[in-house]
Image: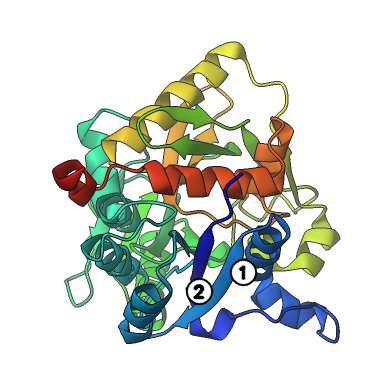
Amino acid sequence: MKRLRTLVVVHASLVPPDSLEGHSEKEIEEWRTEYDVISTLRSSGHEVRCLGVLDSLTELRSAIADWQPDIVFNLLEEFDGIVTYDQHVVAFLELLRQPYTGCNPRGLLLSRDKSLCKQLLAFHRIATPQFAVFRRGARFHVPRKLRFPLFVKSTVEDASLGIAQASVVEDAARLKERIEFVHEQVRSDALVEEYIEGRELYVGVLGNERLTRLPVWEMVFGSMPESLASIATRKVKWDKRYQARYGITTHAARELPPAVLAALDRLSRRIYRALGMSGYARMDFRLTAQGEVYVLEANANPNLESAEDFAESARACGVPYAQLLQRLMDLGLKYRAQWRASYG
């Protein structure tokens, strides 16, 4: 394995320390992903530097010019507090002709904008819940095509930001209230889609032209009361005490019929290509009791924490964490960006 000069780019508040010693569990949770990636790359023999980015690219440009890294390991999920601006950082790297890990600018643009993503999926006749977008400042009107219960979320935010049990609504009054919450508190347009009852399945995909599907993963909602909707709220995804209380876990999906597995494989690849993605991604699906598969979201550059779903599903098919990170770097080095296509 070649030793690579690797510049790991993270949010300015998430630059991790060299050691976990002396830090509380709460502190560690904030920058766990960044620590896992950096410490693993170093233990694999790579020369690693970490750069925190907030609202300026000056330091990034200087680091690339002065150090000339072989690859930038991109862990940014926003720029200047705006989720959809991470695509511009990647576009900046392409302008500098700098190889990087993860998804390209076009794939980030199409997948981060959930309403645009769903329109593209509908065009390709990929089953997704009926939906409507409620713009900030626009008049409230419930389209006839939508049937309650409905699920309300931000059109752009990820990591379950703004998602709670109140996101599933049963009538127009609650719908209006939740849309206003997204507009005022999350400060984005609201995406409203029909709520699909069923199993929540995640499918990881690796690759540029040739794609590899990771084993299907499932979120199991444990002993949550029947009065609560089985959705990945912020508490369900990130609150360890809440997870322990209700026995909420994720693991390899069990007892999936061969036809469903084939459909998930086919759909994951179609979605990845339809959105022009590269590097790695995770597709979120719902499987109904009748065996119908609906895609909920396509997530470019999903969480790379060692103990999270993407890395766990890679381990399940014989790819340990260090090897997974190496594979992501190999894909970044091989990605045929436009400047490479033009200049060889």
**Which residue appears at 70% of the width and 59% of the height?**
40
**Which residue appears at 48% of the width and 44% of the height?**
330
| Residue 196 horizontal/vertical position (percent) | 49, 40
Query: Residue 87: which quarter of the image?
Result: bottom left
| Residue 64 horizontal/vertical position (percent) | 37, 73
| Residue 283 horizontal/vertical position (percent) | 47, 41
Q: Amino acid at mark 2?
A: Val
Return the residue found at the far left. Answer: 342
| Residue 245 horizontal/vertical position (percent) | 84, 62
Q: Residues within 10 Å of mark 2 (few under 14, many from 20)?
A: many
Q: Is residue 64 above or below residue 221?
A: below
Q: Is residue 327 above or below residue 140?
A: above
Query: Residue 239: which quarter of the image?
Result: bottom right
Q: Earlier in the sequence, mark 2 or mark 1?
A: 2
Residue with the mark numbered 1: 34
The tag on residue 309 is none
Is residue 194 visible in this depiction of the protein?
no
Q: Amino acid at mark 1?
A: Glu
Whether residue 310 sits left or right of residue 89 in the image: it is right
Residue with the mark numbered 2: 10
Q: Pointers 2 and 1 in contact (CB under 8 A)?
A: yes
- Callout 2: SS: strand
Query: Residue 126: which quarter of the image?
Result: top left
For the residue pair 137 and 284, the one nearer the viewer reads as 284
**Which residue appears at 43% of the width and 74% of the height?**
67
Is residue 38 visible in this depiction of the protein?
yes
For the residue pair 127 and 303, the one nearer the viewer reads as 303
Q: Residues within 10 Å of mark 1 (few under 14, many from 20)?
A: many
